[in-house]
Image (cartoon, grey):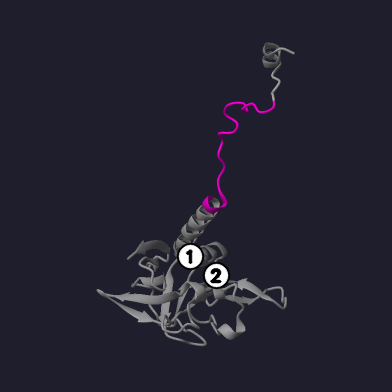
């Protein structure tokens, strides 16, 4: 076979150079691949703390949103069912065992039919409503004394505004009437009493923050009871 025929058929002769371009390709060496993997690992390690802090911030925001939702739900339930609804508050930022606990109760009386369960709403926060919490079952709540809040270092501070100042407290109660009016009692009590207590005239603020965090999530409960959420430094 002549050289020209072999060339036209693409026949490769022994000792001849390979097809141009194939032998010139260069792959990554093992060292280069290891360097790339190390760089990716370092970048991932640097990003983990930032991701953790962002997750903790989201947890704090989620807790504050849940507290706001609980107060709004209490007011809506009181207006919708025609019964008084109570929220108990407990939080102490200096005590890791009391990061924040909010429970909702409804004032009910025996049914007219004589059924065993008390299901008839009672419209008043005051007497004859008996707010002995040990005898009542919470219908909803937000408990921040869990592992998630402990890992994130989330704490809650309760504040009430008096004129131009605000005072911290650890235990308190907010009661909503079917008219949407709210009453407040400050201080721990096994049976909060609203007799003689005027309707709320001072806003209450629930501050939710994480350890070392710059942003504070606050739930503001104004006298009209319509809770709202805002963030500040």
Question: Which label was assigned to residue 8?
Answer: none
Q: Is residue 9 visible?
A: yes
Q: What residue appears at the point 39 percent right and 74 percent down from the top-left corner?
A: 199
Distance of label 1 from label 2 (alpha carbons) = 43 Å
Q: Nearer the viewer, residue 203 or 183?
A: 203
The residue singled out by tag 2 in the image is: 83
Q: Is residue 125 visible?
A: no
Residues at discs 1 and 2 in contact (Cβ within 8 Å) = no
Q: Position of residue 160 (x, y in %)?
A: 35, 76
Q: Is 163 left, or right, of 13 in this rendering?
A: left
Q: Nearer the viewer, residue 24 or 170?
A: 24
Reply yes or no: does residue 26 show up in magenta. yes
Q: Which residues are magenta?
A: 14-32
Q: Position of residue 89 (x, y in %)?
A: 47, 78
Quadrant the N terminus occupies = top right
Q: Dot 2, how many residues are within 10 Å of its Cα: few (below 14), some (14-19), or many (20+)?
A: many
- Callout 2: helix, strand or loop? loop
Q: Outermost residue toward the right?
A: 1
Reply yes or no: does residue 136 show up in magenta. no
The residue singled out by tag 1 in the image is: 52
Would you say the magenta stretch is mainly helix, strand or loop?
Answer: loop
Q: Is residue 36 above or below residue 171?
A: above
Q: Position of residue 3 (x, y in %)?
A: 68, 14
Q: What residue appears at the point 37 percent right and 62 percent down from the top-left corner?
A: 231
Q: Outermost residue toward the left?
A: 164
Q: What residue appears at the point 47 percent right and 60 percent down from the top-left corner?
A: 42
Q: Position of residue 14 (x, y in %)?
A: 69, 27
- Callout 1: helix, strand or loop? helix
């Amino acid at each position: 076979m002549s050289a020209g025929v072999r060339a036209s058929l693409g026949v490769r002769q022994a000792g001849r150079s390979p097809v141009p371009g194939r032998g010139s390709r260069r792959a990554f060496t093992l060292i280069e691949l290891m360097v790339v993997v190390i760089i990716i690992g370092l970048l991932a390690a640097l990003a983990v703390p930032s991701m953790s802090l962002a997750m903790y911030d989201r947890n704090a925001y989620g807790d504050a949103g849940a507290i706001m939702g609980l107060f709004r739900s209490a007011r809506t339930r009181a207006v919708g069912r025609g019964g008084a609804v109570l929220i108990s508050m407990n939080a102490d930022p200096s005590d890791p065992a009391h990061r924040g606990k909010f429970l909702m109760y409804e004032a009910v009386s025996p049914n007219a039919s004589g059924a065993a369960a008390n299901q008839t709403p009672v419209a008043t926060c005051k007497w004859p409503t008996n707010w002995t919490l040990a005898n009542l079952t919470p219908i909803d709540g937000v408990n921040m004394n869990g592992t998630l809040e402990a890992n994130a270092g989330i704490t809650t501070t309760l504040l009430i505004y008096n004129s131009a100042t605000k005072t911290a407290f650890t235990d308190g109660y907010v009661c909503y009437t079917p008219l949407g009016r709210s009453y407040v009692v400050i201080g721990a009590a096994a049976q909060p009493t609203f007799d003689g207590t005027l309707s709320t005239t001072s806003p209450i603020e629930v501050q939710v923050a994480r350890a070392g965090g710059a942003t504070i999530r606050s739930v503001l409960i104004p006298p009209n009871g319509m809770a709202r959420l805002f963030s500040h430094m």
